[in-house]
Structure formats: C-alpha cells, structure tokens
Image: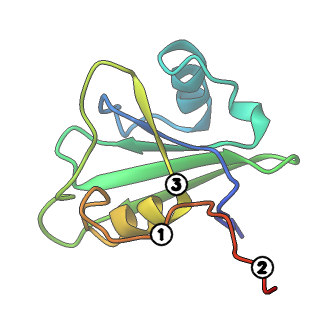
Amino acid sequence: MIQVTPHMRILVAVEPVDFRAGIDALVGVCRQRLASDPFDGGLFVFANRRRSAIKILVYDGNGFWLCQKRLSSGKFAYWPDGLPPARAFEACELQVLLMGGDPTRASVPPPWRALRTAR
C-alpha cells in the first residue's frame, strides 16, 4: 500500500512518457530527464502523450511500486507545462490531480502554517 503524506516529495514529469515503459525505464527517466534519485523515497508521476493515463513510481525501501490510472473517458484536465522537466506537487495537489481536477484552482490550505497558542 502506498501512503501519500504531506511531507512526501512528489515530482510530476512535465513531458509525457511512453506507457510501454516499465519500472526500469521509468527509473532511467527519473535519473536522466528529472535529475532525481528514484531510490530516495520520492513519488514520481508521469502521463502518457494523450494525458488519458498516469503512472506513479515510488520506492518503499524494499522495492518499487508502479501504479497506473487510466480514465474511462476523456483526459486529465490539468498537466503542468514549462521549462523545468518536473514540477513539485504537494500531497493535496496530487489528490486533486488524481480525481481529474486542476490543482492550481483547488482551494487548499498551505502545507505548513504557524499555529496560534492560547495565552
């Protein structure tokens, strides 16, 4: 079971990947295109060219998990674009993305905020 927690590092690859790729090929993408170590416990999210499916790769200390979600119809409404090869996401943004929403329009609290103490 993969548990996505607020302190987890999540990277979403901007460029699509060939979905025939398995774990070993995606590990190579993490190292070469994203310049990241796939063994550091981060969660890596990839989309196919049509944006109708995503794959999530994560190393849990014992082996790799590779999860895939394919939409029944349509495509993911949002996917990051731009010059960096990957964009960092918060856990709540990933949840919105997985539900087919736009994380940039979601109203979520910041990942950390100071708490007021009672006096």
Residue 63 image offset from top left, x and y in percent: 80, 46
Q: Which residue is rendered at x = 78% and y = 86% of the image?
A: 118
Q: Earlier in the sequence, mark 3 or mark 2?
A: 3
- Residue type highlighted by circle 2: Thr
Q: Nearest to the eye among marks 2 and 1: give it.
A: 2
Q: Which residue is mark 2?
A: 117
Taking the spot 45% from the left edge, 50% from the top edge, the residue there is: 55
- Residue found farthest to the right: 62
Residue at 21%, 38% (x, y): give it. Answer: 49
Q: Quadrant of the C terminus?
A: bottom right
In the drawing, does residue 55 fall left or right of residue 19?
right
Say above or below: 92 vs 78.
below
Among numbered discs 2 and 1, the one appearing first in the sequence: 1
Quadrant for the N terminus in the image: bottom right
Observer-nearest residue: 108 or 37? 108
Name the colouring of the figure. rainbow
- Report the residue that reaches farthest toward the front: 119
The amino acid type of the residue labelled 1 equals Pro
